[in-house]
Image (tube, rainbow, N blue to C red):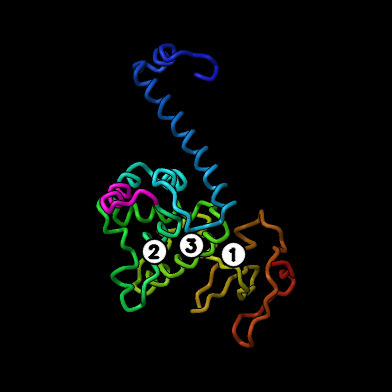
Amino acid sequence: MRQEGSGFRHIAIKFNISTCRVAEIFRREKKRAEWAERSVCLQWECRVINDIDRKMPLEDLFCLFSFPARISIAVRNHLRGKGIQKYSLRDMMEFLIPKVPAEIVSNFIMPACGIAGIGKKYYAEMIRAMSSKDCGEWFQREWADRKDLLKDYLDGIGKDWQALLSPSEILKHSFPLHSFQLAASNNKVHILLPKGEEILIWNAKTSPSFPPQPSLPDCPPPAGAMPPVNVEIFDTHQ
C-alpha cells in the first residue's frame, strides 16, 4: 500500500491499528530489506576477494551471515568484552568450530555454546546461517572441513547432527553422492544400507503416478547380498 502511495494514516484506519504502529512496521521492513541487500553485496565481495583471513567490522560480519538480532547482540558483547572490533571469516569459523587436538575435543569443540545468550539453540542457528552463504571457494572448503569435524564429534557422542543442518544439507547427508546398492522385487525398489536396513523408494502399487520404469543407478550387487532383481526397472542414469 505504501508503494501505491497510501499514507500511514490511511493504512492505520484500514487495519484498525495506530499510525505509530504502521510507521514502526514500515521502518522495520525497510531496514530489513536494506540489511538483506547489504548481505548480498558483502557475499559478492567475499567471493571476489576469496580471503578468509581478511578482517572486517563486526557489524559487517553479522550482516553478511544475517544473524538474528539476539545472536548478534550476544556475540558482539562477548567479542567487545575481549576488545575485539574486527573479525575475519576464519575467526568466526574458529569461534564456532575450532580445530583442536583430538584429546581435548570433548571440551572445546563447541565453545560458542557457553557464551551468554547463545546456547545450543542459537549455536545451531549460527551454523545454519553460515552454511547458507557462499563466501568464496576458500571459505566453502574450510567450513566444510570444520563441519565434518563437528559431525564426527556429535556422531561419536550420539548427538543429533541433523539439528544443525539446513533442509538441503539434510537431503545431501541422507543420500550422499556415491553409489549405493539397490534391490528390486515384487514391483518395489529398495536402497540397501550398510547395516542391513532398507529404504523403500518406489512401490508400483502405492505410487501409480510414478513412471513404470524409474531412472535409478545401475549398481551390480555382490553375490548373495540382495534379493532377486527385476532388471527391467533398472536404468543406467545416476
Q: Are marks 2 and 3 in contact (CB under 8 Å)?
A: no
Quarter of the image with the C terminus is bottom right
Q: What residue is pinned by disc 3?
A: 143
Residue lying at 73% horizontally and 74% vertically, measured from the top left: 231
Q: Magenta segment, principal secondary structure?
A: helix
Residue 118 % position (x, y): 30, 52
Residue sitting at the far bottom: 223
Distance, label 1 to label 3, CA atoms, is: 32 Å
- The type of residue carrying mark 3 is Trp
Residue 153 % position (x, y): 38, 71
The answer to whether residue 191 is left or right of residue 8 is right
Picture quadrant where residue 31 is located:
top left
Element type at marker 1? strand
Distance, label 2 to label 1, CA atoms, is: 35 Å
The answer to whether residue 225 is above or below residue 147 is: below
60 part of magenta stretch: no
Picture quadrant where residue 72 is located:
top left
Element type at marker 3? helix
Question: Which numbered dot is residue 97?
Answer: 2
Q: Nearer the viewer, residue 196 or 217?
A: 217
Residue 52 % position (x, y): 49, 58
Picture quadrant where residue 200 is located:
bottom right
Q: What residue is pinned by disc 1?
A: 201
Question: Magenta residues?
Answer: 74-86
Q: Are marks 1 and 3 in contact (CB under 8 Å)?
A: no
Residue lying at 56% horizontally and 56% vertically, measured from the top left: 50
